[in-house]
Image: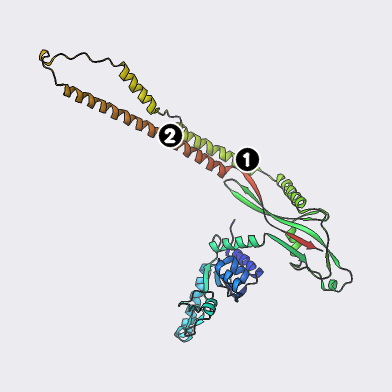
């Protein structure tokens, strides 16, 4: 799923207008806005500043942004405006003397910290008076932040249909019928992915379920304020039972769909797993030399020493012809023992390394298999992304 620059702009403007932000400049490629206190708290991440404002009661100075939705078109418009201004008046920049939206030579505006603590901000000023510029395109950090703020702030709403003017003058109050509306996101996922939105509504009086509940709401004037001369009926169905009824209704609708895509995805998964198993089969079936433990080596050494026969008594040196000194025999035996030990250690290290390599290859095989199952296995995921109580006439 992706969004065009026009769709991103429409979404961001809807969010800004819902939070009563002040639109200062607007074009098809950008919008310059001064945030409202609620939007500033949600988007600027300044908890210490807002804590200071709430503790002292000082007037809040929110930040301003220029959100660019189409960078190429915006840059072309800027270059065209600069070229037009240069042709009209080459010295316009010098005569106007505008820098960062404020005329040169003017003293910096008084800030909250300067008013209470006498702190003089250094130039250039980096406070709320400066207009920050950001590109807001699909996938950008700022757009993801707006998505999160809208999801958190609008996860649940409580709205009332506004009555006509003649109802305000009527003698008998009008009656509201409570409805529970839930917007479900359904994800059909394998190595491919498709998403659907299902906005369902259920009456808490009669239990009637309406699909495409948003179409019913679009034709009505809704407000979070209860209108005068209106009466809210008591619900007969609890929210828990109403939510369960909507989930059951959506499940029955999903069972009626064609799931041939899931069968094809399972076939692709089986094929990929067969290729993976064939690739690792030869490696995993190799024989690994066994490594002798130090206990076994010590026992073998003891057996060798116990089976060794004691040497015969040495004859006197004068009776032995061409005899070698005793020290030479000891040195030769020691060198032979060292050579045997070094060969044994080399074989043990080689066997240990073979075991380590085999375990690493086995872990790699299991990881690849788990990732492939996660990627190709067909699954359907249902998530409730927003809900609300709607009191309708």
User: Where is residue 52 drawn, in percent x and y?
Assistant: 57, 71
Residue at 78 percent across and 53 percent down: it is: 238
Instruction: Please rate how many residues cluster around mark 1, counting C-alpha atoms within 10 Å: few if below 14, some from 14 to 19, many from 20.
Output: few
Percent coordinates x, y for residue 79 in the rendering: 48, 75
Give the image's coloring scheme: rainbow
Question: Which is more N-terminal, label 2 or label 1?
Answer: 1
Q: Is residue 94 above or below residue 337?
A: below
| Position of residue 86 in the picture relative to residue 162 (left or right) | left
Looking at the image, which residue sits at the far right? 171
Q: Does 303 appear above or below 363?
A: above
**Can you tell which quarter of the image residue 178 is in?**
bottom right
Q: Which mark is residue 358?
A: 2
Residue 38 percent location from the top left of the image: 63, 69
In the picture, measured across the screen, residue 16 lies left or right of residue 132, that is: right
**Which image quadrant is residue 11 in?**
bottom right
Crowding at label 2, few (<14), some or many (≥20) Cα neighbours within 10 Å? some
What's the residue at 13%, 14% (across, down)? 316
Q: Name the residue nearer the viewer: 357 or 44.
A: 44
How far across and down, in percent of the image, does residue 159 sit?
Answer: 75, 64
**Residue hosting label 1:** 263
The reply to whether residue 212 is visible in this rendering is: no
**Label 1 – label 2 distance at C-alpha:** 35 Å
**Along the viewing direction, whichever of 58 and 6 lies nearer the viewer:** 58
């Amino acid at each position: 799923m992706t969004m065009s620059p026009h769709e991103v702009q429409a979404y961001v403007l809807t969010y800004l207008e819902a939070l009563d932000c002040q639109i200062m400049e607007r074009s098809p490629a950008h919008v310059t806005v001064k945030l409202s206190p609620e939007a500033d708290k949600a988007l600027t991440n300044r908890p210490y500043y807002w804590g200071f404002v709430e503790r002292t009661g000082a007037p809040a100075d929110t930040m301003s942004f220029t959100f660019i939705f189409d960078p190429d078109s915006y840059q072309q418009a800027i270059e065209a405006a600069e070229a037009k201004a240069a042709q009209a008046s080459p010295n316009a920049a010098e005569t106007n003397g505008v820098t960062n939206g404020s005329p040169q030579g003017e003293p910096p505006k008084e800030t909250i910290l300067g008013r209470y603590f006498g702190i003089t901000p250094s130039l250039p000023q980096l406070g709320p008076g400066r207009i920050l510029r950001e590109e807001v395109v699909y996938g950008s950090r700022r757009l993801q932040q707006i998505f999160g703020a809208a999801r958190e702030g609008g996860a649940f709403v409580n709205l009332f249909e506004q009555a006509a003017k003649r109802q305000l003058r009527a003698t008998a109050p009008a009656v509201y019928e409570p409805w529970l509306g839930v917007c479900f996101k359904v994800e059909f996922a394998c190595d491919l992915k498709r998403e659907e939105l299902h906005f369902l509504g259920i009456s808490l009086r009669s239990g009637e379920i309406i699909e495409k509940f948003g179409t019913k709401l679009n034709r009505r004037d809704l407000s979070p304020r209860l209108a005068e001369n209106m009466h809210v009926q008591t619900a007969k169905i609890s929210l828990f039972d109403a939510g369960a009824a909507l989930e059951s209704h959506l499940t029955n609708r999903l069972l009626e769909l064609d799931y041939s895509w899931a069968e094809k995805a399972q076939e692709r998964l089986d094929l990929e797993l067969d290729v993976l198993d064939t690739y690792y089969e030869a490696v995993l079936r190799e024989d690994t030399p066994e490594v002798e433990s130090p206990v076994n080596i010590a026992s073998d050494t003891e057996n060798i020493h116990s089976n060794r026969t004691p040497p015969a008594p040495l004859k006197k040196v004068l009776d032995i012809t061409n005899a070698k000194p005793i020290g030479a025999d000891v040195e030769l035996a020691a060198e032979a023992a060292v050579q045997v030990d070094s060969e044994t250690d080399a074989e043990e290290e080689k066997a240990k390394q073979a075991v380590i390599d085999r375990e690493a290859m086995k872990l790699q095989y299991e990881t690849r298999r788990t990732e492939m199952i996660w990627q190709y296995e067909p699954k359907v995921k249902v998530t409730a992304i927003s809900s609300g109580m709607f009191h309708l006439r």
